[in-house]
Amino acid sequence: MHNPEFAPFPTEEYLARYEKARELMAEKGMDALVVTGKENVVYFSGIQTIGWYSKHRPLGVVLPHGADRKPMIVLHESLLSVARETSWIEDVCPWGGKRFSQEPPDPAGGFRKALSDLDLVHSTIGMELGYGHRLGISHTDFMTLKCSVAEAKFVDGSDLLWELRMIKSLREIEALRKACEATTAAFEEGFDSLRVGMTEKELAGIMFARMAKETHERPGFVMIRSGPRKYGMVNVEPFYKPIHRGELIVVDAGALYKDYWADFMRMACMGPVTAEQRRFFEAEVESLQAGVKVTRPGVTTGEIFEACFSVLLTRGFGEYLALERVGHSLGLDMHEPPSIARGGTIVVKAGMVLTIEPIFSDRPNYRIGNFGLEDVVLVTETGCEILSHFPKELHVVST
């Protein structure tokens, strides 16, 4: 078996993932799984390429169910050497037709040839057609592929993929732990640098630099909400906006390590905190802690939601609440199922890595602030372990 030197994990990790995928394919009546989105291709193959930033040379993996057939990578011919050095999968179907004139000229032809070589053209094939997934090939390429293998039946493989990826292996957990450690270091340096008049972009730049220093990889993301103009914004980029005295600062950030995301929120205040801001913040802390406290195997995601939500109701903040969910899982995607939502029925299991993040504001006026804290928790056999170690106290900047 090929053991590439520069893959993120040992070959045995990918073999274990493939074996679990084969078991699920048998349960769901699939003869093969074809994945083209970055996260799923990396999950199964380990391949390391910046080619993901180009939409012109898609790649993917064909994963047969049968033990008599081997997985195959379909990629542009320019990535052959990259595949050899970073992926355990030995069988490759190149497309491009320039270096190897006998090969297909386009990605649809490459996938068609791979399915033919693996004797899968009359099979039921799962692809990323549903919730939380995106095809990494164009719609035109997908339709061309379907027409060229008209005997095949293409079905949604999303449930299979999420069922597999929701439970993290020990190596995945260690990658997530490292990403959280790097994010903690970024919060430490970023919050220590806070001063009146600095822009949100400056703060984000400091945190990005520390993430990269800690992981030696590309930084992940930084979201900042500071001041009344931004308290009501969701998933917003840092702006070239100065942070003024008296403004609350909500920072949501996450480093990347081996393509695995961290994602947690902390808060600061530029100068003295008002009594109302303190009252809101203390309710936010209590709500988060209540959600973490009930997180363990056997509870439903809806029960975690209710634990967070009921605290805010009891504390008298019902008029401000528009919460439909208070968290999610994370891994190779920053947001993964299960969603910790109102009425959620998914049962929490050991090995899940979840975020818990009740968020609320004094809407619709947004004069007091936006209040958001978030922890990353690993579900253990008996409860959960917090992986996001930066303190949850409100960081008050002396001005």
Image (spheres, grey):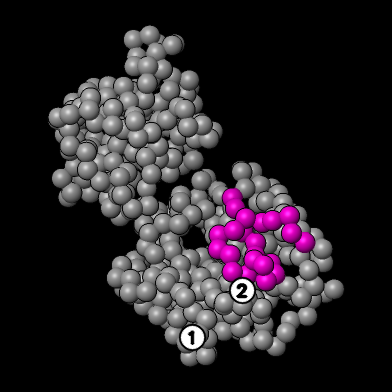
Q: Based on the displayed image, in which of its 4 quarters is residue 345 positioned?
A: bottom left
Single out the residue that lies furthest toward the front.
365
* 2 or 1: tag closer to the N-terminus: 1
Q: Secondary structure at mark 1?
A: helix
22 sits left or right of 365 in the view: left
* Placement of 105 over or under 119, stated as above or below: above
Q: Residue 164 lies in magenta, yes or no? A: no
Q: Which quadrant holds the C terminus?
A: bottom right
**Residue 33 percent across, percent down from the top left:** 27, 39
Write the start and end of the magenta stretch as one range. 220-242
- The amino acid marked with disc number 2 is Asn
**Residue 105 percent across, percent down from the top left:** 37, 16
Q: Could you tell me if residue 215 is visible in this image?
A: no
Q: Residue at x 43, y 11 (%)?
A: 98
Q: Secondary structure at mark 2?
A: strand
Q: Residue at x 30, y 37 (%)?
A: 34
- Return the residue nearer the eye: 59 or 70: 59
Q: How many marks?
A: 2
Q: Residue at x 73, y 55 (%)?
A: 240
The numbered dot on residue 370 is 2
Q: Residues within 10 Å of mark 1 (few under 14, many from 20)?
A: some
Q: Could you tell me if residue 237 is visible in this image?
A: yes
* Placement of 96 over or under 384, stated as above or below: above
Dominant SS in magenta: loop
- The amino acid marked with disc number 1 is Gly
Q: Based on the displayed image, in which of its 4 quarters is residue 339 positioned?
A: bottom left
The numbered dot on residue 318 is 1
- Return the residue nearer the eye: 397 or 200: 200
253 sits left or right of 29 in the view: right
